[in-house]
Image: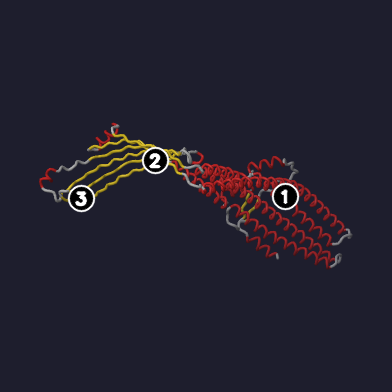
Amino acid sequence: MLLLLSLIANASAATVPLAYNEALDRALAGNLELQMVAQDLRVAEGALLAARGIFDPNLTAYDTFNSQRNQDVQQFGEISSDLRFNTWGLGLGWFAPTGTTASLDWRSTRSEVQYDLIDFPASLRDQFVQPDPFVRTRLGATLTQNVLQGHQIAFNLSGVRRGHQAVDAAQAQLLAQRQQTLANVALAYWASYYQGQLVEIARQALAVSQEEARVVRVKVEQGTLAPVEQTRADAAVVQAERTLIEAQQGVRTANDSLALALGEEPGTDFLLSTAPAEAVALNIDVERAVAAALENNPSIVALKVQVVGSEADWLAARHQRLPTLDATGSFALNGTEADQAASVGELFSGQLPEWSIGANLSVPLGNRADRGNLNSAAATYQKMRLQQLSLERTISQQVRAQAAALQTAAVQVQLSKANLRLAEQTLAAERALLDAGRSLQKDVLASIRGVDTAKAELQKASADYQVAIIELERLKGNL
């Protein structure tokens, strides 16, 4: 048995000192789940940036050369023609949240035409004059305004709003994961600390059992105790050895859980250097704790974001029932001359203006699609409000229950301390009675086990007190 204990003790990796605050910092830097949720936030931020892109101006540039050969038959015979066009231009367009679409376009086309009078008499060929190349330039602006559906800024910003909602939800989820990560690390830390204390208690218990067995062996050899007491003492040693093995196995399991919470590989043997805070009687203002939870709890914050978004979707669905009516106007200046400079000069002279004005109306008959979307959006909004109310009531109940559990945990620590003092006094009394011949060895062994149990219960009560504090702060969103 002692050899097995030695093998277990030497199987652990190098011991790593770890304070409580250091564990929290390492978890925030290395926890894998927290890092994954942080990437979700980056995804949402990218989607928001893309949603805003609908309002970015769009610049286009083009340059096209076109060549075309045609044949035609006139009264004097067949005519072959070669047409060459070179068109280039720049365009700038954008869409505004007011439902306004605007564009500005500059276009210039150089045209050349060559004719071949295949069947014409030579005299007519000599009289025919090839037309000179010419350049046509146009500068135009077009403006379209949504008058009914699409004129509301809030409606046109629906995509951006959903992007903001996704970012807010991702931030709330990240905060929730941060709170949960800290809580998990804290729970794992104190669980590991508790298991470490059980190992120390088990080691002390083994040493006491071995010393008790030695004393009993001497007394049996002296004839002052019956041999059966030696058997009881030896059995107590074996039981203590088994308890120590189980405690050491519990430490390894707890250390692995702590390593995972920190975002590290299992197998590390941590030496926890922070002891639990002294348990004190708490006077918790339950109503203030509930108010803090309703304001800061990440789950409630995330749900509030969804409620606001569903209300905006409902309002957008109401607006979408309107018909589509677009008012359109355009104005352009033109220039047509033999070269580019002359064409541009004529354009800016304003001699060849061009303008138009109009409207387009689209009315979906029956409009069942928009009415169905409105009904769904309204129901979703009402459902979100009910979910928020339900979650707020649940969190309120959990905070009240956890506040009561924390007060109970503080009392339990004090009770465990009293039980330990009683167990130690009982053991001292049994030893005195045994020395006076008024008690049995089995009663002393039972008192020793009572002391060990009381020590373990005190450590568990201290760990439960720390856990209760952590859980209450997590519900309040204060970790």
- Report the number of discs: 3
Pick whichever, 232 or 349, lies toward us. 349
Where residue 64 appears, as percent x and y from the top left, is: 29, 46
Which residue is located at x 71 percent, y 40 percent? 287
Q: Specify which label sits upstream in the sequence, 3 or 2.
A: 3
The amino acid type found where label 2 is placed reads Gly
Q: In front: mark 3 or mark 1?
A: 3
Circle 1 sits on which residue?
462
User: Hey, which quadrant is residue 388 in on the image?
Assistant: top right
**Disc 2, disc 1: CB below 8 Å?**
no
Where residue 38 appears, as percent x and y from the top left, is: 54, 48
**Disc 3, disc 2: CB below 8 Å?**
no
Q: Specify which label sits upstream in the sequence, 3 or 1.
A: 3
Q: Rounded to the nearest whole Å, what is the CA distance between mark 2 and mark 1? A: 68 Å
Direction from residue 348 to residue 14 in the image, left or right:
right
**Disc 3, disc 1: CB below 8 Å?**
no
- The color scheme shown is secondary structure
Q: Residue furthest left?
A: 123
Badge 2 crowding class, 10 Å Cα cut-off, few under 14, some 14 to 19, many 20 or more, is some
SS at circle 2: strand
Where residue 479 appears, as percent x and y from the top left, is: 63, 45
The amino acid type found where label 1 is placed reads Ser
The amino acid type found where label 3 is placed reads Asp
Circle 3 sits on which residue?
72
The quarter of the rendered structure image containing the N terminus is: bottom right
Badge 3 crowding class, 10 Å Cα cut-off, few under 14, some 14 to 19, many 20 or more, is few
Q: In front: mark 2 or mark 1?
A: 2
Circle 2 sits on which residue?
93
Direction from residue 323 to residue 457 in the image, left or right:
right
